[in-house]
Amino acid sequence: MTFKELTALLKDRSSGGKKGSLPTLKKTADKLGVLPATYKTALIAGTNGKGTTAFLLAEIAKQNKLKAGLFTSPHIFDIRERICINGIKISQKDFCKCLEKVLSAEEKPLKFFELLTLTALVYFKLKKVDFAIFECGIGGLKDSTNIINSSLSIITSVDKDHEQLLGNTFEEIAYQKAGIIKKEKPCVLGQVSQKILKIIEDTCIKKNTPLIMPVVNNIKLDFVKNTTEFTLHDKKYILNLLGSKAASNASLAITAANILGFKKEIKNLNLKDFKARFEVKKIGKNYLIQDGAHNPAAIKEFLNTYLKSPYFKKENILVYGVSYEKDYKTCLKLLKPYFKKVCLIDFKNSCPKAELKKYFKGYQFIEEKDLTKIKANIIQVGSFYLSSQLKKYLPK
């Protein structure tokens, strides 16, 4: 099958039907001979910050001369972004080869994310990686990636998102995230409330798992260099991302690298082409800021950085679009006080513009095609998929 045909097949598998079954998935993985992994692995769950932590840990591994696999989601421009080794995405040829191998092994039709998880496992085995990081899709306990008995687990944060799948309370969601914790394998945890901490601690005690919670200090944002400086265990680090939360996520990656025995310490954490995490671009005399904040907790973190930045102006244009199942009402309530102009963008499975417009009475609406005609900063917030949609309307 061609790459185009296989991506069409994946698209078909992404809609309709029940959620997959981990026992069925595990059976297929065993048939493929990809488990147990012959290399060290890290499994990352969390409401927000999974991607940042995963990319940073992969970069630290690469700087330690390791062949590091990385499986993340969602993709922004190309589905192959989800499967990388040392920052290079899987080729179309290898993508087709590995996915076809998975398809030939399935006994029952697997779902979109299951197929991609197994494709990553097949690819990492084929390329003989030294280490691989797997970012959970949703939750953790029932997520496809949880078939991996990881060397280490990371839980970045616990907040409300995907309630229809994970539960309506923080406790229910925390229980799902804690599902990735492995027996006697270390767990690195971000800063959470005492109530959630108790659930994670209890799980670690039952599984005789060491729990590590790094704490960052002296966080300083530099909006000229677009960097964040912080200290961890009295050591100073510089990260080429903006935000206090970015520093916290970096501390998780650094801590995980230390536990895994990576010897070379990286003081300057530089991610290349890292998309939509308070990403700042110059467009003429103005700026474009792209951030994938799509739930209330992420919006709060975005605003925490944005309102301190020199880019914050009331005349800025908010570009917004979000999946229909997200808590967009709370997100908009948080965003609205800081904007007067808004551009709403549709994409597959997004909340319709007509619905979102109801919450912007009295605001000036801008059409996508007119974005570059207006002399103002463009602030894109919402789904990660917005970046690819917005690209059609901006100068190259």
Image (tube, helix red, strand yellow):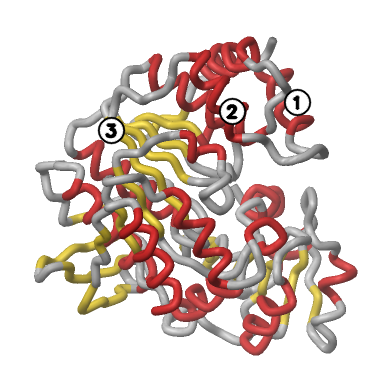
Q: Nearer the viewer, residue 202 or 190?
A: 202
x 75%, y 31%: residue:
13
Q: What is the quadrant of the N terminus in the image? A: top right
Q: Nearer the viewer, mark 2 or mark 3?
A: 2
Residue at numbered disc 1: 8
Q: Which amino acid lies under the numbered mark 1 shown in the image of this protein?
A: Ala
Regarding mark 3 in the picture, which secondary structure is present there?
A: strand
Q: Which amino acid lies under the numbered mark 2 shown in the image of this protein?
A: Leu
- How far apart in space, not on screen, are marks 1 and 2 (Cα)? 21 Å
Q: Earlier in the sequence, mark 1 or mark 2?
A: 1
Residue 25 numbered tag = 2
x 82%, y 39%: residue:
16
Using the image, determine if residue 81 lies above or below residue 241. above
- How far apart in space, not on screen, are marks 3 and 1 (Cα)? 33 Å
Residue at numbered disc 3: 40
Q: Earlier in the sequence, mark 3 or mark 1?
A: 1
Q: Nearer the viewer, mark 1 or mark 2?
A: 2
Q: Is residue 282 visible?
A: no
Regarding mark 2 in the picture, which secondary structure is present there?
A: helix
Q: Residue furthest front?
A: 206
Q: Position of residue 65 (x, y in %)?
A: 18, 32
Q: Marks 3 and 1: CB-CB under 8 Å?
A: no
Q: Nearer the viewer, residue 344 or 121?
A: 121
x 24%, y 39%: residue:
61
